[in-house]
Image (tube, rainbow, N blue to C red):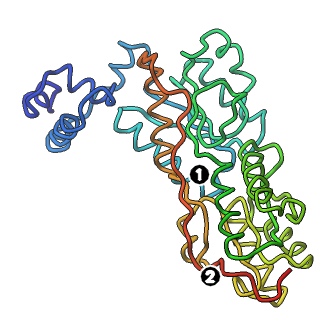
Amino acid sequence: MPTIIDVAAGAGVSIATVSRVFSQPDRVAEPTRRRVLAVVDALGYAPNVAARSLRTLRAAKILLTVPDISNPFFASVIRGVEEAARDAGYTVIVGDTRHDPEIEDRYAEMLARREVDGLIFLGHRLPATLAPLLARNGATAPIVNGCEYSESLTVPSVHIDNAAASAEAIEHLVALGHTAIGIVTGPAASPISRDRLAGALAAARRHGLEDQAIVRAGDYSARSGYEQADELVARGVTAIACFSDEMALGAISAIRAAGLSCPADVSVTGFDDLPFACYFDPPLTTIAQPKAVIGARAFGLLIGILNGDVAIERQVTLPHELVLRHSTAPARSGAV
């Protein structure tokens, strides 16, 4: 069975460097890390995580909680976390909290009991169970948020600028001549939905259209997109900005059910750029988030905390992109 000594010799590095590749990969130069991992693969070396855990008093596991695991948006985020964690020798435990604070607390107790080394949560609430840990440890508490940035969380976070992204979608619709625009938000309790709404209304305000924007609350699901778009179409909007791709899919179905066409009669934008967004009929204009990168960077922040890096970034804002496809078009002639 190959040993860490064999790996070090094969890669031409010290044993300490090999160890850091698994425990602190961000502190090893990428070419060196790649060379070590290539030797690891070639030799079939498996690090003794259990032994390392005994030495470091770490479980070599992290907890990742997801508010709705059935939402396809989270699949890529989970994969980004898992791949980064695996490269660092950590196992990821995934918990589906279903937006339930009680379930969130039950999972969070794993961190309080030290069954896991850290927590990445993708929802908008910090579990109440962890308030004492956060108060006691402050910036060294191994807790990171992904996606749902809120200043009140007081923990490191990885996200996009949701207000700017939503504003960009509205600017695109206005540039196409749309003035009667419907907006289908997420739940009011969601900080990202509030940020996206603030950005959308700010963009509408810049063009004197804030009073004409019709806002309806959805829950990110296709069904809510259908229900809210059905009312918006009846009110004569020529464009609908949805705060998720799933709601956009529902909106397009509602437009067709009303005997209209997307985008000839009503344009639609989404948010997230899910893998199937380009296969919608029509392909969806949407805001792309770097989902896997969000997950990987969130793990990077967490491992930085675990390794005692006091200089880690507290808030990481990643770039978004407005992806133009065929669900948006110039406002129909004579539209109000």
Q: Earlier in the sequence, mark 1 or mark 2?
A: 1
Q: Position of residue 122 (x, y in %)?
A: 63, 40
Asked which secondary structure carries label 1, the reply is helix
Q: Position of residue 313 (x, y in %)?
A: 49, 27
- Whether residue 133 sits left or right of residue 198 in the image: it is left
Quadrant for the N terminus, please: top left
Of residue 74 and residue 111, the one placed in the foreground of this image is 74
Instruction: Kindly identify the amino acid type of the residue bearing the numbered disc 2.
Output: Pro
Q: For the residues marked 1 and 2, what is the alpha-carbon distance in whole angstroms?
A: 24 Å
Q: Position of residue 31 (x, y in %)?
A: 19, 38
Instruction: Kindly identify the amino acid type of the residue bearing the numbered disc 1.
Output: Phe
Q: Position of residue 121 (x, y in %)?
A: 62, 36
Task: Give the residue displayed 41% in from the left and 32% down from the top.
Answer: 90
Depicted 153 relative to depicted 210: above or below? above
Q: Which residue is mark 2?
A: 282
Q: Quadrant of residue 176?
A: bottom right
Disc 1 residue crowd, few under 14, some 14–19, many 20+, Cα 10 Å: many
Task: Give the label on residue 18, or none.
Answer: none
- Whether residue 45 sits left or right of residue 232 in the image: it is left
Task: Give the residue displayed 59% in from the left and 39% down from the top.
Answer: 146
Of residue 333 and residue 60, the one placed in the foreground of this image is 333
Task: Give the residue displayed 55% in from the left and 59% down from the top.
Answer: 288
Asked which secondary structure carries label 2, the reply is loop
Disc 2 residue crowd, few under 14, some 14–19, many 20+, Cα 10 Å: some
Task: Give the residue displayed 61% in from the left and 73% down from the top.
Answer: 284
- Whether residue 46 sits left or right of residue 255 in the image: it is left
Q: Which residue is mark 1?
A: 74
- Whether residue 14 sits left or right of residue 180 in the image: it is left
